[in-house]
Amino acid sequence: MSRIEYSAEVAELLGRVRRRPTAGWPWRPGEQVPDGLPVKQSWGWLFAPDGRVLTLVNPRDGICSLPGGSLEPEDDGDPGAALVREAGEEAQAAIGRPYYLGYLYDRVGSANGGHECARVRMTAALRAVGPSVADPASGRHYRRLLVAPGLAVELLGWGEAGLRQARAAVATAVQRLGVPAAANEAIEELPVEGCEVFPGVEHP
């Protein structure tokens, strides 16, 4: 097994990572959200051209996350629109067209006032990131890492269910975005001043 490469600054950040307990929401790959089940959140696997994905780390508490969040009225019920907006707010990221992967069924409804809901997962190309600033909604100022999907699952603490999500995301990204099935495994922090990431053309 090859050694994972990363800088001293990233090593210090990874040393602070804390994993959330898994919620155990069932993953419904490729299934459309049933009528009557509200979609409350949308999160994205955002790919660089070498197959790595954008993973956010909150340096205050060490919690890792994918870009995404709750649907707001301006999203008009569209999980793709919510992902575009949230990626911009949280990570200052410009992304390509979001592709639907499936949803997590939240029976307890912790994101919906105790009523069941769906948490959608999507994938898209990470086109570019702008200068790093705090999320205007939460005040969190994330560090932005490019990480191989399997390593992202480890940082997120999502276990086997997360690996199934990652495989679905990779399969779609290989087909739609032309990324390699085997990602670069180096962990890289994106520059605070921003940069272009994935200017390529998507496949229909």
Image (cartoon, rainbow, N blue to C red):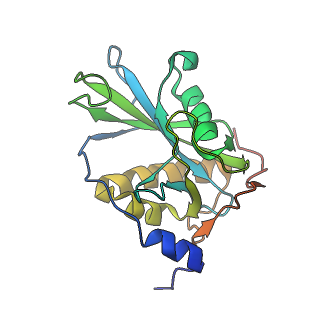
Quarter that holds the C terminus: top right
| Residue 6 seen in this snapshot | no
Q: Is residue 112 visible?
A: yes
- Name the residue rendered at 51%, 27% in the picture: 79
Where's residue 137, x and y in %? 53, 33
Q: What quarter of the picture does the N terminus occupy? A: bottom left
Q: State the image coordinates of residue 43 (x, y, percent, origin top left).
A: 48, 39
Determine whether 61 is above or below 104 in the image: below
Which residue is located at x 35 percent, y 62 percent? 18
Residue 151 location (% of width, % of height): 45, 66
Q: Going by the image, does 163 lie left or right of 142?
A: left
Please state which of residues 143 and 80 is positioned toward the viewer in this rendering: 143
In percent of the image, x 53 and y 65: which residue is there?
A: 148
- For the residue pair 40 and 162, the one nearer the viewer reads as 40
Residue 19, x across and y down, in percent? 33, 59
Tally of marks: 0
Placement of 12 over or under 55, stated as above or below: below
Q: Is residue 84 above or below residue 170?
A: above
On screen, residue 49 above or below 184: above
> In the drawing, does residue 149 fall left or right of residue 126?
left
Classify residue 154 by image quadrant.
bottom left
Residue at 74% x, 53% y: name it: 198
